[in-house]
Image (cartoon, helix red, strand yellow):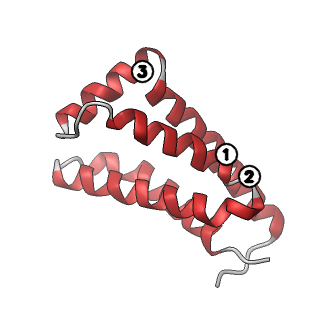
């Protein structure tokens, strides 16, 4: 169990919420959604998986701000970031590992926080 102050946990959860909601929305709509579809297809994912990932990121981001579902939301986001890391490792993209490692690590802090 990690002991971090409540304010630090909320700052971390808020930062993650903004990041995941924005990235999730970019996978769901607009010109960025098309680029995400192309990237995911290049990595061998089926069509439409970007929408599923985007929805999980948006719901997970909002879930971080709700005390009753915070741990479940953080666990979902950790799983997504593990998948992102594995995708980049399998496709030899080591420079793309940093964002999911950082976001996943912060989600792990939120997951492990206890009042």
Q: Are marks 3 and 1 in contact (CB under 8 Å)?
A: no
Residue 94: x %, y % from top left:
26, 51
Q: Are marks 1 and 2 in contact (CB under 8 Å)?
A: yes
Res 62 label: 1
Residue 26: x %, y % from top left:
49, 27
- In 3D space, how far apart are the residues under numbered discs 3 and 1 (Cα atoms)? 21 Å
Report the residue marked by disc 2: 65
Q: Nearer the viewer, residue 43 or 106?
A: 43
Specify the quadrant of the image occupied by residue 71. Answer: bottom right
Residue at (30, 47) in percent of width and height = 95
Residue 110: x %, y % from top left:
64, 65
- In 3D space, how far apart are the residues under numbered discs 3 and 2 (Cα atoms)? 26 Å
Residue 93 as seen in the image, left or right of residue 13: left
Between circles 3 and 1, the one closer to the viewer is 1
Res 32 label: 3
Q: Is residue 81 above or below residue 6?
A: above
SS category of the residue bearing label 2? loop
The disc, 3 or 1, on the residue closer to the chain's N-terminal end is 3
SS category of the residue bearing label 3? helix
Q: Nearer the viewer, residue 98 or 30?
A: 30
Q: Residues within 10 Å of mark 1 (few under 14, many from 20)?
A: many
- In 3D space, how far apart are the residues under numbered discs 1 and 2 (Cα atoms)? 6 Å
Q: Residues within 10 Å of mark 3 (few under 14, many from 20)?
A: some
The N terminus - image quarter: bottom right
SS category of the residue bearing label 1? helix
Residue at (62, 49) in percent of width and height = 16
- List the single residue furthest toward the top: 31
């Amino acid at each position: 169990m990690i002991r971090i102050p409540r304010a630090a946990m909320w700052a971390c959860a808020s930062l993650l919420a903004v990041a995941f909601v924005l990235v999730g929305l970019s996978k769901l709509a607009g010109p960025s959604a098309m680029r995400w579809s192309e990237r995911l297809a290049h990595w061998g994912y089926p069509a439409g998986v970007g929408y599923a990932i985007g929805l999980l990121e948006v719901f997970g981001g909002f879930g971080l701000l709700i005390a009753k579902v915070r741990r479940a939301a953080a666990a979902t986001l950790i799983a997504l970031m593990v998948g992102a890391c594995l995708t980049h490792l399998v496709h030899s993209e080591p420079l793309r590992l940093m964002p999911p490692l950082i976001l996943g690590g912060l989600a792990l802090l939120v997951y492990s926080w206890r009042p």
